[in-house]
Image: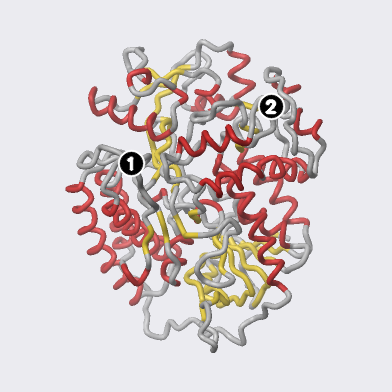
Amino acid sequence: MTTSAVNLATDTDILIIGSGAAGLTLALRSAEFARVTVLSKGSLRDGATFYAQGGIAAVLDSEDSIDSHVEDTLVAGVGLCHPQVVEYMVAHSAATIAWLVAQGVPFTTRAAHGGHEGVASPGAENSSSAAELSSLHLTQEGGHSHRRIIHATDATGKAVFETLQRRAQDHPNIELLKSCTAVDLVTQTPENGSQRVCVGVYVLNQETNCVEAIRAKFVALATGGASKAYLYTTNPDGASGDGIAMAWRAGCRVANMEFNQFHPTCLYHPHAKSFLITEALRGEGAKLELPDGSRFMADFDEREELAPRDIVARAIDYEMKRLGCDCVYLNITHQPAEFVREHFPTIYSRCLEFGIDITQDRIPVVPAAHYTCGGVVINQQGETDIGNLYAIGETACSGLHGANRMASNSLLECFVVAFGAAESIQRKFETTGFTESINPWDESRVSDSDDEVLVSHNWDEIRRFMWDFVGIVRNSKRLNRADRRIKLLREEVRDYYIKHRVSNDNLELRNLALVSELIISCALKRKESRGLHFTLDYPQTDATSSDTILVPDQL
């Protein structure tokens, strides 16, 4: 049952921070053997999942293959994907879709859309019949060589979220709490000196404005990414890298934070905050055009509009700077109006609110920060460097995405790693107990803030210089300038945090400043251009390369 955060539980078997696809999946997979509490710092739907348009990549078509999906992912990741991880994720893709169908997610079918006539590939039976899976409509997105994107029209994330939320609300072992902001993880080192373990979390109850300690046998970070570090982003306001920052402060390694994916096509309109135009439009034939109507993607890649996102975003950025124009345009007016309205009802309706009829008008678009490919270092089951602490979804760096995430692999990763985390927790569950106690939160030497403008000013400054100096195209001069500024700002933020009672804004700024420093540090370490990290001082891609891994005690 969903409740407010008036009375937080003092303990729970599994505490999941984040209520998106990854968090809700882990909750549902674990609730059969454990009591589960899911925290959201806003409303339950405030995460990135609800706003995801495109879909979930999975091999369901007999004309497709696991090897092909793996190869496409490796190519998009530009040599940094971990092949065994990619193979693991893709091999579990059909089972993921089968589970979601069994939960009741209303995916678009071929009967509803006409079009693709593929059949289910071998191994797709699992929880749903092959016939059910073969009925699903498949579309194509950038970087994919086949139609393999399962979707619910152009609002897949919303359909997935609402279905999983209903399931979680109805489960007697799951408690969903809103308006709860995680402050920090609580860890302890066993007397035998073995691996440090996570035993709970300090949580700000926004309704009482008090910080309370929650004990847990297991904690999972499912807080999403850190794209709010940038001035322009497709992400909701809460994407401030909370889980990454908390894990780093607790002692976990992070990796590949320099690889920030900028979605090529965000609606350009003064009142259209963070509205993404799904890549599936290009999959269905939409063309990118300059203001004069000429196309340009052929000058940058033979795959044109279906090139991976890093290539398309840099091409748009280059043309905008070359011409001094505010945006480029996405044109799907050559498709029948009925086709466009049926395939993209959400985008059609939203654009119409701003006076843009996409069946007749071109869509003005610009790139915007979209996805954090790096994060907390995990294995295939979401396990981190700290015992009983898991990271899943965009918070984590599993090795799937490498230097550039391929479209619609992100939701796939959410489900597959959440499945693995649930299995890992179940194996340990009977032999894991609660810690005896957690020290209460101490705010005896702090005061209420009387100068909140410091928080808003620092927030705005970080996002501005991250966009200007650590954006789509970088150089060493810009990165070093950003590095000097973020170190100074982190001192200011730390001083403010120590002296004042915590608030949601204060906590987000603290985390945002830290993840920005991690992004800059990783970018400075990479002396090449690869995937999403493009620097004018090192424009070539090295023959070999490795992950950029940061260790807390060594930064």
Q: Residue 114, relative to residue 388: is it above or below?
A: above
Q: Is residue 141 above or below residue 399?
A: above
Question: Where residue 551 sits: x, y (%)?
Answer: 37, 66
Residue at image position (74%, 45%) is 99
Front-lying residue, 80 or 115: 80
Q: Image quadrant for the N terminus?
A: bottom right
Q: Residues within 10 Å of mark 2 (few under 14, many from 20)?
A: many
The residue positioned 37% from the left and 18% from the top of the image is 298
Q: Nearer the viewer, mark 1 or mark 2?
A: 1
In this picture, is 54 found above or below 17? above
Q: Residue furthest front?
A: 543
Q: Is residue 9 left or right of residue 232?
A: right
For marks 1 and 2 on the same chain, the one whose residue lies earlier in the sequence: 2
Image location of residue 543, percent across then percent down? 33, 41
- The Cα atoms of the two marked residues, 1 and 2, are separated by 39 Å
Instruction: Identify the mark at residue 382; answer none if there is no mark.
Output: none
Percent position of residue 74, x then y: 49, 39
Report which residue position mark 1 lands on. 543
Q: Quadrant of residue 486?
A: bottom left
Q: Judge left or right: residue 120 versus residue 392.
A: right
What amino acid does circle 1 point to? Answer: Ala
Q: Element under label 2? A: loop
Image quadrant containing the C terminus = bottom left
**What is the three-letter code of the residue carrying label 2?**
His
Q: Is residue 6 above or below residue 178?
A: below
Could you tell me which secondary element the residue under label 1 belongs to? loop
Q: Which mark is residue 137?
A: 2
